Amino acid sequence: MGKVLVIGAGGVGTVVVHKMAALPEVFTEILLASRTKSKCDAIAKQIGGNRVQTAQVDADSVPELVELINSYRPDLVVNVALPYQDLTIMDACLETGVSYLDTANYEPKEEAKFEYKWQWAYQEKFKEAGLTAILGCGFDPGVTSVFTAHAAKHHFDEIQYLDIVDCNAGDHGKAFATNFNPEINIREVTQKGKYWENGQWVYTEPHEIHKTLNYPEIGPKESYLIYHEELESLVKNFPTLKRARFWMTFGQEYLTHLRVIQNIGMAGIEPVMYNGVEIVPIQFLKAVLPNPGDLGENYKGWTSIGCRIKGLKDGKEKTYYVYNNCSHEVAYKETGTQAVSYTTGVPCMIGAMMYLQGTWKKPGVFNVEEFNPDPFMAELNKHGLPWNELHDVDLEL
Ligand code: NDP
């Protein structure tokens, strides 16, 4: 059906190409390109069957990207490198006339601030070129956004209160490690908290608001209000929302390490001179922390991510909870990665499938909740991320 170019050979990229390779009727040809070609080669070898070709590319360079895209001529470019590369890859897609999909919104390297404004600014250019850009097609953002669209379409006349709850109850046996790229992860979780209420953003100190929430088949976990990127597009696309918040579980050990890392300046993004060499503390930290892609082997337990929603149906108040639980061990057995990479990579593959099948294909730049959620929800059940729903339950929030 189609040719794809996947950029980024990390934990998420590993899952994306594993899943694509298993569906030759959809993904007829796959090229995996990244900064370090040997990582692409290792993934291609692990998959076997000559399903995945590999290439080297510096995705910060538009001319390099343009050359690669023109030589391969894919139907879609899937960006699972880092958020820093979103705009260069979008520019290269425009220059070569190819559609685009990613899992995380653009963030400038020199400022720990992620916002959709930079990518939404490409709306007219993609529209005029007749190309599609699908933004934020991982789990959160991604599945959580599709869950919200599904709830609004099928279970409510008006959604009013949304709480996205992200629990990782897994144990990787390390004193401290992040579940996806450490630099991006630490920048995200050390930001000020922020949520939407009554038409405006409310700011909190980092981890100031927290609450014990019960997760299905897991139990109680301390959950912290943090800002997460899908809130920005969801409050825009679902204007009936009176409040939208995002909660993530953290263990005490993790938070203590994080506090120390911040206090001693290791989360800094400004370069410092060390022995005559300029280094960025958080990038140096990434180099000494465990590689998230290697955590899978001894990872036990589950993730549980979902949406707890309250609103109106037939004039009455209704509550609804839709979620997926994913086992780190099962994810590792299938793809050699832990559940955080898995829960991001599977929806990314499904989004690419939606595009190639023509289901999610229209000119312009879109967040995933702007497409029909039904075919995507059906594919989640088939490809390892089955979802469950609970009606009229206590949402605890
Ligand atoms: P990793 O750090 O494991 O992988 C990133 C990959 O991108 C690496 O292979 C890296 O190359 C490559 N890369 C980095 N810079 C460049 C560049 N300039 N040119 C080419 N390749 C480059 O990250 P993850 O796999 O954990 O995460 C991938 C993406 O997924 C991130 O954007 C992350 O924010 C997003 N994500 C989204 C989630 C969601 O639910 N929506 C959840 C988790 C992650 P090298 O190996 O040489 O360093």
Image (spheres, grey):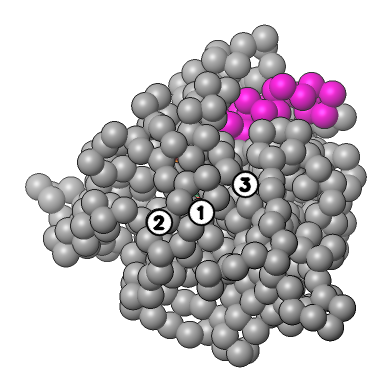
Dots 2, 3 in contact, CB < 8 A: no
Q: Position of residue 59 (x, y in %)?
A: 54, 44
Q: At numbered mark 2, what does the secondary structure look like: helix, strand or loop?
A: strand
Q: Earlier in the sequence, mark 3 or mark 1?
A: 1
User: Horizontal placement of 223 versus 129: left or right?
Assistant: left
Q: Residue furthest left?
A: 275
Q: Amino acid at mark 1?
A: Tyr
How dense is the environment of label 3, judged by Cα within 10 Å: few (below 14), some, or many (20 and up)?
many
Residue 324 - label: 3
Left or right: residue 43 versus residue 75 is left
SS at badge 1: strand
- Kindly identify which numbered label has been placed on residue 221: 2
Front: mark 3 or 1: 1
Q: Circle 1 is placed at which residue position?
A: 215
Q: Is residue 87 above or below residue 168?
A: below
Name the spot of residue 282 as percent of width and height, x first: 28, 53
Tell me how far mark 2 sits from mark 3, CA to CA. Answer: 16 Å
Q: Earlier in the sequence, mark 2 or mark 1?
A: 1
Which badge, 2 or 3, is on the more N-terminal residue? 2
Residue type highlighted by circle 2: Lys
- Queried whether the magenta region covers residue 19, the answer comes back as yes
Q: Is residue 218 magenta?
A: no
Label 2 crowd (10 A; few <14 / some 14-19 / many >=20): some
The quadrant in which residue 124 appears is: bottom right
Question: Whole-Å distance between the Cαs marked 3 and 1?
Answer: 10 Å
Residue at point 72% right, 22% down? 22
Q: Is residue 192 visible?
A: no
Question: What residue sits 84% from the left and 83% below the top?
Answer: 315
Q: Nearer the viewer, mark 2 or mark 3?
A: 2
**For the residue marked with disc 3, what is the amino acid?**
Asn
In which quadrant is the N terminus drawn? top right
Which circle marks residue 107 in the picture?
Answer: none
